[in-house]
Amino acid sequence: MTSKEIRDLSAEEIIVKLRESREQLLQLRLRKQTGQVEKTHEIRTLRKDIARLRTIQNQKKSPAPAAA
């Protein structure tokens, strides 16, 4: 998921996507421990997606700085 796609989402949709991504990450980590994950790069991708979601969520919460 790209930053542009995330910025187009509403605050509630970001929260839902964040929750889903965290759940997927948990499932992947558990499957990795049992040796069932073939595509380990998906864990890194999910972590980056979660970081993007949280960053944009925080940007939407805080007011934009005043231009000088």
Image: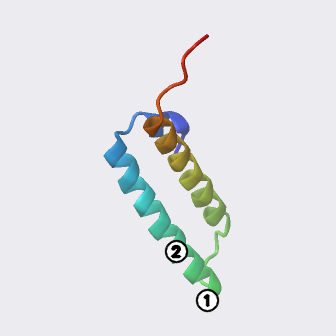
Label 1 SS: loop
Question: Which image quadrant for residue 19?
Answer: bottom left
Marks 2/1: CA–CA distance: 13 Å
Which residue is at 62% across, 80% downward? Answer: 32
Comes first in the chain, label 2 or label 1: 2
Residue 22 in the image: state x and y as whole percent: 49, 65
Task: Identify whether 23 is placed above or below 55.
Answer: below
Which residue is at 36% across, 43% downward? Answer: 11
Mark identifier at residue 26: 2
Q: Amino acid at mark 1?
A: Thr
Q: Amino acid at mark 2?
A: Leu
Mark identifier at residue 34: 1
Task: Identify whether 41 is placed above or below 27.
Answer: above
Label 2 SS: helix
Q: Is residue 44 left or right of residue 23?
A: right
Farthest-out residue, bottom: 34
Query: How packed is label 1: few (under 14 Cα within 10 Å), some, or many (20 or more)?
Result: few
Question: Which image quadrant for residue 16?
Answer: bottom left
Residue 6 in the image: state x and y as whole percent: 46, 40
